[in-house]
Image (spheres, helix red, strand yellow):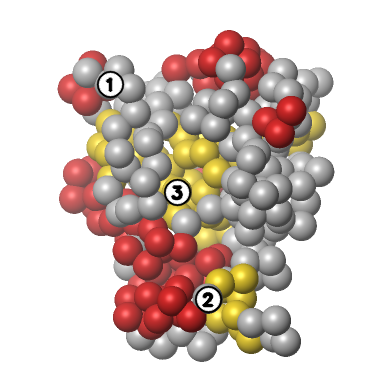
Amino acid sequence: MLVSSMIQYTVSALLNASSDRVRHGFLSRHGGVSVGPFKSLNFDGRDGDLPGNIKRNKAIAAIACNCPIEKIVTVNQVHGDTVLCLDEKTLAWYDSPVDADAIITALPDIPIGVLTADCVPILIYDPVKNVAAAVHAGWKGTVKGVVVAAVKAMSGRFDSSPADLRAAIGPHIRECCLRVGDDVREAFAASFGEIDNLFHIDAVGLRLDLRAANLRQMVGVGLDVNHITTDAPCTACHTDRFYSYRKEGGKTGRQLSFIMVR
């Protein structure tokens, strides 16, 4: 956990080592001005936080991370597999978030990001083509293969080779806390086939490992397993540091994970 004079956040040593042209971070919930269930570095206003608070939180993060977070491009996350390709044309008409769960871009100095409070944030970087992606993968998006869609979009739009990509999985609800029903198991079985290593059964019921599921998908689409970091903490276990939708009863903020090429 990196600590500035204002906020706390983590970075991936793997992404940093790949190039000096990328800037990124997985932010915690600390250091902002939001109050109540959104305390304090909240970036999502859909559940009732004031727009002014979110604007101030972006300004705080921009200074702390030395990145123009006030210009960040996010999407209206809908638990699907749609990928927004952000280029000069789409940026010109981008007045409000569109429905998508991943963003890819080669535009310099324009940060892209996803908002999470248990779902899996994945940041991907191509040090050869200098292209970045930010992915939001809840269980529904994982079943639909959103991270696979993002990698394929990078390959199709920017000629990225999956073998060159570096990826970092950020804080999310881990298998220790993610309890699901048989309907979720059935959905994964239909999508993944073999799912024994994705689900664990204890005295209470089923637990799902979203980290393992997204790792399998990334390796399956061509990423080197040694180019993926997965040692992220559990949001539900650490609500002192992160927002957790499940642990906090559905009334909470959203932390930001961002990436920017230079």
- Name the image quarter holding the N terminus: top right
At 52% from the left and 39% from the top, the residue drawn is: 115
Residue 166 rendering spot, x and y as whole percentages: 47, 53
Q: Residues within 10 Å of mark 2 (few under 14, many from 20)?
A: few
Q: Is residue 177 above or below residue 3?
A: below
Q: Which numbered tag is attached to residue 181?
A: 2
Real-space CA distance between mark 2 and mark 3, rounded to the nearest whole angstrom: 21 Å
Instruction: Give the left or right position of residue 215, taking residue 101 as reference.
Output: right
**Quarter location, residue 175:** bottom right
Q: Which tag, 1 or 3, sits closer to the chain's start? A: 1
At 30% from the left and 39% from the top, the residue drawn is: 99
Q: Are marks 2 and 3 in contact (CB under 8 Å)?
A: no
At 77% from the left and 51% from the top, the residue drawn is: 238
Asked whether the viewer can see residue 262, the reply is no
Real-space CA distance between mark 1 and mark 2, rounded to the nearest whole angstrom: 38 Å
Which amino acid, mark 1? Answer: Tyr
